[in-house]
Image: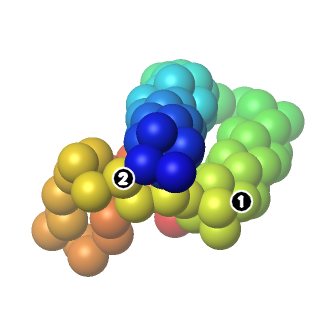
Amino acid sequence: MEFHINQLSSAINKIAHKQSHVIRRPLANILGLIEVLNVSDPSPSTKKIIKLLRKSCKELSDEFDDFMIDDGYTSITDTEDGTNQPFLRLLK
């Protein structure tokens, strides 16, 4: 029984790590690229694409939050604007 609990605990920790690092990293990269596009004086059509990309990233981030597992070790520090994930500031 204890072995089974340890296996489950290990699996949950791996899932939590993937959620907080492996999956969110590409999302943060996309948001960074969106900001690069945004500061380069985008055309009206590019502005529409940026808006759609932000909306999709926000939806994806919300989905991650719905199944986020707290592994007890991963620390997400609060930011000045009160969000838990620093990149959420870019979604506004």
Looking at the picture, how far across and down is residue 78, in whole percent?
Answer: 20, 65
Which residue ends up furthest to the front in the rendered image? 1
Q: Is residue 2 left or right of residue 80?
A: right
Q: Which residue is mark 2?
A: 71
16 to 65, vertically: above or below: above
Query: Could you tell me the amino acid type at mark 1?
Result: Glu
39 to 44, vertically: above or below: above
Nearest the viewer among 88 and 75 is 75
Q: Are marks 1 and 2 in contact (CB under 8 Å)?
A: no
On the image, which quarter does residue 76 sit in? bottom left
Q: Which residue is mark 1?
A: 63
Q: Residue at x 74, y 42 (%)?
A: 53
Q: Tag 2, which secondary structure?
A: loop
Query: Which colour style is shown?
Result: rainbow
On the image, which quarter does residue 23 sit in? top right
Looking at the picture, how far across and down is residue 42, in whole percent?
Answer: 64, 30
